[in-house]
Every structure is written in structure tokens, then in C-alpha cells.
Image (spheres, helix red, strand yellow):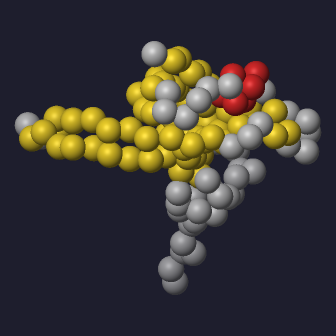
Amino acid sequence: MHAPEQPVNPPSDAPLTAGEDGENHLLLTATLTGRETLRYNLSGVPVTECTLSHASRQLEAGIERQVRLDISAVALGDLARELAGIDPGTRLTVSGFLTPLRRSGRALCLHLTRIDQY
């Protein structure tokens, strides 16, 4: 008799076990290409969603490759207010952590924890 298969991803309310509490931190230089109007969530917390575009050359296995990507991002609280005041087209260095865009989806969203303009 075979043992039942264990789920690959534990339920979101399952406690973390050793090895699951690793780093999730992203640092990215990008251009703000789209920004929604500041809104408030059901708890009254300010929220601003945006799109960031990145382009660079990266060295991989000794070969230079061109990288271009767009990523959805969101800022909450005081950072949402700051983001709401930044004009599209502005170059930024941002940091934050990645989460699924939708609870059961594969697309990612960057939750911003810091924004630096340059």
C-alpha cells in the first residue's frame, strides 16, 4: 500500500518548519511606468499599486544576456503616499518582498518596503 502524497505547498495557515523561513528580499533598479491613484483598503490603510519596468545586461555562465521585464508592485502606508507622489517615468531603486499576485496564482507582485529616487 502506498502512502498518500503530501501536498507540495502547505496551506497558508500551516506553521513554518525548518528551512521555510528563508530570505525573500528583492532589490531592483527600474522605471515607474504606471501608477494607480492612492486608495485605502478595508482597514483604512493607504495603498498604491504600480508597474515597474527594468532593463539591463546580465552575465550568466560567461554569456551576456539582455534582460527586460515588467513587474507589478504595491506599497502600503506611508510608502503608498510617497509612491502616489512620484511621476511615471521616474527612475527608482526599490526593495521589497515577493508574493503571489493572486492567492492561487503564479504571477508575482513586489511588495515595496523602500523607494529611492535618482
Question: Which percent across, then down, holds residue 102?
Answer: 65, 58
Residue at 85% from the left image edge and 42% from the top image edge = 41
Which residue ends up furthest to the left in the rendered image?
62
Q: Which image quadrant is residue 21 in?
A: top right
Residue 62 in sight in this render: yes
Give the quadrant of the C terminus.
Answer: top left
Which quadrant holds residue 111?
Answer: top right
| Residue 1, x across and y down, in percent | 52, 83
Instruction: Say if 109 sits above or below 62 in the image.
Output: below
Total label count?
0
The residue located at (32%, 46%) in the rendering is: 68
Q: Does 99 appear above or below 77? A: below
Q: Is residue 79 visible?
A: no
Left of 66 or right of it: where is 8? right
Residue drawn at x 8%, y 37% as measured from the top left: 62
Q: Position of residue 67 (x, y in %)?
A: 27, 44
